[in-house]
Image: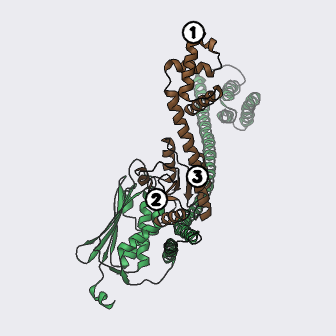
């Protein structure tokens, strides 16, 4: 409402009160001024503080002129003064109470409005935060998917590389005796086709060629036995020769990694009863692990020590010791768990399988390690029983 | 076999390969000496005759390439035939850059190896001859006095006796005498020959 409108409305309320009071004056002879406070009340309530005061003033003049005897004069007789003052006071009080009410209500409304605005703001803020969080989560999920894909790809590449390395190692092991075969066969031919053939030289060259070929086929047989899955057998096994055979296959890696090898085999080591292939698998695994553990060692010597010895009564022990990076204490207890690995390319099965093989043979496999000094893997196996001896 | 006959030195850690190559080389009448490792080779007494080295690349301890580099650095180069289990290209390139005569891959064909060995021995004969010539030249030029060396330097620079005498502040006759000594001590029968010998020695020492 505009200000002129509010003031006009206030005047109108007073006018209505005046006209109604004048109308009531005829049937009731008493001065009927009581409608005026109602007018003031309405004016203050609806039109505001300023118009309220205008209504108060106008009502006072109207009552004094029309309803204070002598009527329709501005004369105010002393006996009417208390009445007149109480009337004015009544009006002012009505005006003030209404004004106070209106102010309170306005304040309340404002407070409520402000509150609503703040609630709306907060709600919007929270929605934004929520949206951002959802986006972040989606982004994180995408990153994780990419990471997973990369990891899978890496594992694949590493696996292929490992297979390639193994193939290269096997190729070397087979190629070496083949080289001997070719050189000796060539020599044999040369001795025979000389102007004066030398049969003695030709024969020894031919024998060496045969020896080389035998060695090549042994390497192949060993590789085949390593990958075949024959049923576990119980036969007398010479652990020392098993160690030597495993080393023939690992020799390439030992040389390549510039590892110095020390072999402390007890010549009086008793036989054990077990599965050659499985036990060789354990040895190969321990040796391969030892070589791996030293791959990144620099600044100190890389040594691989393999020791076999008789311990206590009717038991043998084999240890494979490296000077590698070592294994921390928190890992060493989990070493033999399936799928536990500290290597990026490992699948974590080697030691788990080795452990179960040794236990199946009635022995024990364990590890001791010092960080940055190296690790010893040691296993025990029971000696072959005399009763079994007799059967063979 | 005479003690001046060429010798083939074989270094391979694999006994059977070593025996085979040795037998093959002996069958064509060459002397052979075998070694199981680089260390064994280095500590051995090698006769001073034309020779070649047959060297396995992959050996425990010092590798064949390491040994070859060591010999090159010590200026005791022996023409070398490398034998490798896997003749990968980078390794071959490295060996060739190091001055290997030949790089053969196992298993080696007998004839290839024998050809390579013969070529290497021929190369060593030439090398030895050159080294001997240089040594003799060196000895002859060393025997010159300081004054004679001064005269020599000016002679090979193309100066006339008179110019040399001016430069050294002496008489032409003295220069002539020094010059005669130079020709005599270096056994040069002409100025052209003297210049050739001088250049050869200079090039060698420069290298």
Instruction: Inspect this view and state whether residue A140 appears.
Output: no
Going from the N terminus, do you reach mark 2 or mark 3 first? 2
Q: Secondary structure at mark 2?
A: strand
- For the C terminus of chain A, the image quarter is bottom left
Q: Secondary structure at mark 1?
A: loop
Q: Nearer the viewer, residue A343 or B179?
A: B179
Count of numbered tags = 3
**Please, which chain is the residue tagged with disc 3 on?**
B
Going from the N terminus, do you reach mark 2 or mark 1 first? 2
Asked if labels 1 and 2 touch by Cβ distance under 8 angstroms, the answer is no
* Residue matched to label 2: B34
* Residue matched to label 3: B120
**Marks 2 and 1, how far apart at CA:** 63 Å
**Please, which chain is the residue tagged with disc 2 on?**
B
- For the N terminus of chain A, the image quarter is top right
* Residue matched to label 1: B171
Q: Colour of chain A?
A: green
**Marks 2 and 3, how far apart at CA:** 17 Å
- Same chain for marks 2 and 3? yes
Q: Colour of chain B?
A: brown
**Marks 3 and 1, how far apart at CA:** 53 Å
The x, y position of residue A230, in whole percent, is 48, 82
Q: Secondary structure at mark 3?
A: helix
């Amino acid at each position: 409402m505009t200000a002129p409108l509010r003031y006009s409305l206030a005047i109108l309320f007073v006018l209505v009160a005046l006209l109604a009071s004048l109308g009531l004056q005829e049937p009731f002879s008493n001065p009927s001024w009581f409608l005026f406070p109602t007018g003031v009340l309405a004016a203050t309530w609806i039109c505001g503080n300023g118009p309220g005061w205008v209504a108060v003033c106008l009502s006072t003049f109207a009552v004094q002129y029309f309803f204070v005897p002598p009527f329709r004069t501005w004369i105010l007789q002393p006996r009417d003064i208390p009445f007149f003052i109480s009337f004015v006071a009544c009006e002012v009080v009505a005006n003030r109470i209404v004004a106070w009410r209106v102010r309170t209500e306005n304040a309340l409304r404002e407070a409520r409005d402000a509150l609503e605005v703040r609630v709306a703001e907060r709600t919007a803020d929270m929605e934004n935060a929520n949206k951002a969080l959802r986006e972040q989560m989606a982004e994180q999920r995408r990153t994780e998917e990419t990471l997973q894909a990369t990891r899978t790809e890496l594992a694949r590449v590493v696996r292929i590389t490992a297979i390639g390395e193994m193939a290269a190692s096997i190729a070397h092991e087979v190629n070496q005796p083949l080289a001997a075969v070719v050189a000796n066969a060539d020599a044999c031919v040369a001795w025979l086709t000389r102007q004066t053939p030398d049969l003695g030289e030709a024969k020894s060259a031919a024998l060496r060629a045969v020896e080389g070929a035998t060695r090549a086929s042994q390497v192949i047989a060993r590789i085949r036995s390593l990958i075949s899955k024959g049923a576990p057998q119980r036969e007398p096994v010479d652990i020392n020769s098993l160690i030597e055979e495993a080393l023939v296959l690992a020799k390439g890696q030992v040389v390549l990694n510039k590892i110095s090898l020390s072999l402390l085999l007890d010549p009086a080591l008793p036989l054990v009863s077990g599965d050659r292939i499985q036990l060789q698998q354990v040895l190969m695994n321990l040796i391969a692990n030892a070589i791996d553990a030293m791959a990144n060692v620099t600044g100190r010597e890389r040594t691989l020590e393999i020791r076999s010895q008789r311990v206590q009564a009717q038991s043998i022990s084999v240890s494979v010791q490296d000077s590698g990076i070592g294994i921390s204490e928190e890992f060493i207890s989990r070493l033999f768990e399936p799928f536990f690995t500290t290597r990026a390319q490992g699948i974590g099965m080697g030691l788990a399988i080795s452990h179960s093989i040794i236990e199946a043979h009635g022995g024990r496999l364990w590890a001791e390690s010092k960080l940055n000094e190296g690790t010893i893997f040691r296993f025990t196996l029971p000696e072959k029983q005399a009763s079994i001896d007799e059967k063979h | 076999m005479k003690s001046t006959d060429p010798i083939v030195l074989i270094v391979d850690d694999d006994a059977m390969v070593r025996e085979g190559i040795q037998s093959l080389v002996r069958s064509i009448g060459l002397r052979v000496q075998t070694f199981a490792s680089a260390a064994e080779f280095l500590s051995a007494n090698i006769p001073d005759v034309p020779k070649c080295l047959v060297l396995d690349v992959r050996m425990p301890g010092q590798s064949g390439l390491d040994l070859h580099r060591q010999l090159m650095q010590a200026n005791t180069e022996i023409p070398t035939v490398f034998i490798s289990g896997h003749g990968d290209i980078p390794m071959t390139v490295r060996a060739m850059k190091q001055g290997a005569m030949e790089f053969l891959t196992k298993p080696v064909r007998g004839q290839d190896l024998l050809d390579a060995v013969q070529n290497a021995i021929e190369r060593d004969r030439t090398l030895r001859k050159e080294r001997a010539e240089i040594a003799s030249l060196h000895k002859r030029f060393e025997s010159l006095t300081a004054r004679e060396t001064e005269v020599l330097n000016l002679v090979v620079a193309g100066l006339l006796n008179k110019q040399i005498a001016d430069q050294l502040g002496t008489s032409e006759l003295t220069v002539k005498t020094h010059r005669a000594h130079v020709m005599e001590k270096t056994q040069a029968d002409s100025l052209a020959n003297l210049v050739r010998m001088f250049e050869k020695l200079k090039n060698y020492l420069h290298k």
